[in-house]
Image: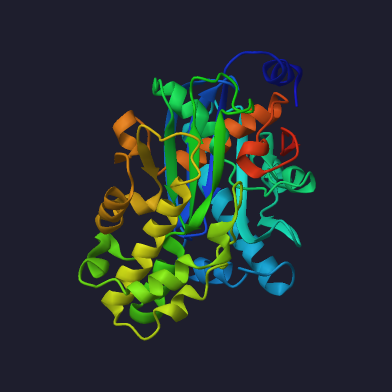
Amino acid sequence: MNKAMHRQWSGTGVVTALGMMSGTSLDGVDAAILHSDGHDITGFGKSAYRSYTSAERAVIAGGFGRWQGAEVEAAREAVEAAHLALLREVLQEEASVDLVGFHGQTLAHAPRLQGTLQVGDGALLAREIGLPVVWDFRSADVELGGEGAPLAPFFHHACARYAGRKGPVAFLNLGGVGNLTWVDPRIDRPEAEGALLAFDTGPANAPINDLMQARLGQDFDAGGKLAARGRVEQGALELFLAEPYFARMPPKSLDRNDFADMIALVGELSDADACATLTAMCAAGVAEGMQHCPAPPECVFVTGGGRHNPVLMRMLDVSLDCPVAPVEEIGLDGDMLEAQAFAYLAVRVARGLPTSCPGTTGVRAAVGGGTVSRV
């Protein structure tokens, strides 16, 4: 790292960061540029997406739930190759990037047991692209007793302030797993008491995608069309809500496959009824989680792939006591919010600022996770 970069990181100026994210829904890799001083968002730059190939998706999925072994190594190689290809593509057009925030791909997450595993070597990427890379965002949080997830809440706090919100709001990310962030933007610092509460609400797109792949050979329920033709099986929904996870107080987090038995609950149903029931389970988990909000949010802003499912959005609108809207209504990009989050967190790590706190992960004290690999 040269002296000019060190001065930029240790000072108060704006940094141009590129964030990268690959979620448990396994659609592909997102990359997004953000400008920030580590506190405020000063602007957004270009974004890009690279879909996983069917072969890459199968290899990475083969590593889910595993902590070591050949399947994990194969998944690691696929993740690194996909991210590196997109990185090179973006950096060819954007030479102004100062550093990269690299989340990697979560294969296993059990913070109270083995820990958490995100494959992908940030040091390797740094050597390949010639830029500093911030990565391994979760380990420090888990080592200090936190859940290691969700990690986007500090960014959600900055987003609420960027959008000029004056009262409490919530951000709902519907990826493979659902997670909710309650934000009070009137509090300046995200780590301050009362500024944030965050937790995973339950499974979201992952079980729906798995069902569609297993039964129909399709990656997801495009436009919610299959769910729209089905009927929700109330008995299965009640069994789902009886899971002990929903009785736990937040903060709390989930692994992608923690609710794998959901598929068994709908195993005897028709394709349409099974899809409708899994979609209703996602919405019901969110409704249960909303009870933990310190105060009613003015609106729930939805990000992630789930906001493109009109059936799921209608279910949320009916079951929640406040307006529900895609984050685009406040000028944000719901397809890139997670990638932007890791760009923002990378700047905070570089500046020595915390990235999680007791209200977001249950960690004992505010902590700045992340490893900086320099070229």
The quadrant in which the N terminus is found is top right
Q: Nearer the viewer, residue 166 or 296?
A: 296
Asked whether the viewer can see residue 334, the reply is: no
Question: Seen in the image, is 200 located left or right of residue 50?
Answer: right
Residue 110 appears left or right of 59 = right
Residue displayed at 30% across by 69% down = 276
Q: Position of residue 329 (x, y in %)?
A: 29, 33
Name the residue rendered at 63%, 33% in the picture: 346
Q: Determine the residue positioned at 72% across, 15% down.
A: 7
Q: Nearer the viewer, residue 74 or 288?
A: 288
Q: Looking at the image, which residue sits at the far right?
A: 143
Q: In this view of the protein, which residue sits in the foreground, 100 or 283?
A: 283
**Identity of the residue furthest to the left in this view:** 229
Based on the displayed image, in which of its 4 quarters is residue 97 positioned? Answer: top right
- Horizontal relation, residue 6 to residue 303: left or right: right
Q: Quadrant of the C terminus?
A: top right
